[in-house]
Image (cartoon, rainbow, N blue to C red):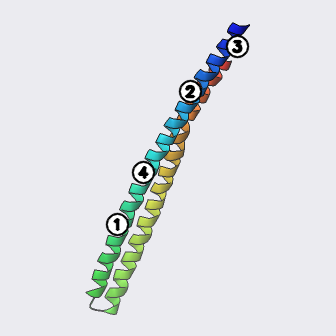
Amino acid sequence: MPEEFKNIGEEYQRMSKEGLDAATRSFGEMNKGFQALAAEMTGYSKRTFDDVFHAWEQLLSAKSVEQMIEIQSQYAKKAYDTHMSEMSKLGEMCVAIARNTAKPVEQATARTAKKVE
């Protein structure tokens, strides 16, 4: 009987270690994902600022009201298209973060479930 308790204790320690390792890998994946997300958002912000600055330069050099309206229309269309594209990309990145973060825990859970069966 004491040998059985010893085996149960060892199995519990092994499973606990596997769970902790899975959680550590999961947090690592989440950290990498958030860093990539922050880098993407920083790049998007810089590109947006550059586009605004370029549009202002064009507006200041416009020769007529019609030309100003055309410049503003082009800028608005580009800003909308860029924004929608970026939001789609950020959404995909968030889904990938969730998927990659859950993967180590899912794998550890599957391994544990197979051993319990």
Callout 2 crowding tier (Cα within 10 Å): few <14, some 14–19, many ≥20: few
Residue visible at 32% across and 78% down?
55
**Residue 21 placed where, x, y %?**
52, 31
List the residue tagged with mark 2. 17
Q: Nearer the viewer, residue 99 or 86?
A: 99
Secondary structure type for disc 3: helix
Q: Earlier in the sequence, mark 1 or mark 4?
A: 4
Residue 104 vs 47, above or below: the answer is: above
Callout 3 crowding tier (Cα within 10 Å): few <14, some 14–19, many ≥20: few
Q: Earlier in the sequence, mark 3 or mark 4?
A: 3
Residue occupying the far right of the picture: 1
Q: Is residue 1 left or right of residue 108?
A: right
List the residue tagged with mark 3. 5
Query: Spatial distance from mark 3 to mark 1, Cα to Cα?
Result: 61 Å
Query: Spatial distance from mark 3 to mark 4, Cα to Cα?
Result: 45 Å
Which of the labelled discs sits on residue 46, or is there none? 1
List the residue tagged with mark 4. 35
